[in-house]
Image: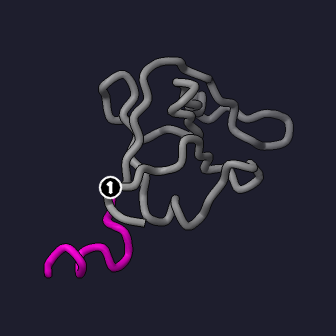
Amino acid sequence: MSDTDLPPDRLSSNPRSPHYDEAVLARGIGIRFKGLQRTDVEEYSRSEGWIRVALGKKVDRHGNPLTLKLSGEVESFFESPAPGGESEATE
């Protein structure tokens, strides 16, 4: 992957989700929702235009955080360069 690559179209921070990817999350993902940087995003979908955020400390009966789905323009980006990406750029 190069720095020009975008993060996946859909990603979740919940390990039980089929959209969870630990390698991508370890690199760091930044989310801009409606033009503002968000740090509380649990899951997002760029193509469908939504994010999920936790509702404070509220949890369901299984101990999972309750989330709220917000619709709007979603932009995602990597917060850190790809491993080995800096050495190729300095040549």
Residue appearing at x 85%, y 35% in the figure: 61
Circle 1 crowding by C-alpha within 10 Å: few under 14, some 14–19, many from 20? few
Residue 64 to residue 90: above or below: above
The majority secondary structure of the magenta stretch comes to loop
The residue indicated by pointer 1 is 4
> Where is residue 21 drawn, in percent x and y?
62, 59
Q: Residue furthest right?
A: 61
Outermost residue to the left:
91
- How many marks the image carries: the answer is 1
The residue under label 1 is which amino acid type?
A: Thr
**Image quarter of residue 88:** bottom left
Residue sitting nearer the eye, 52 or 44? 44
- The residue at 37%/47% (across/down) is 77
Q: Position of residue 28 (x, y in %)?
A: 42, 58
Residue at image point 47% right, 51% down = 7
Examine the structure image and report whether residue 81 is included in the region drawn in magenta: yes
Looking at the rendered structure, the secondary structure element under dot 1 is loop
Picture quadrant of residue 86: bottom left
Colour pattern: one colour
Point out the stretch of residues depicted in magenta. 79-91
Image position of 17 (left or right of 43): right
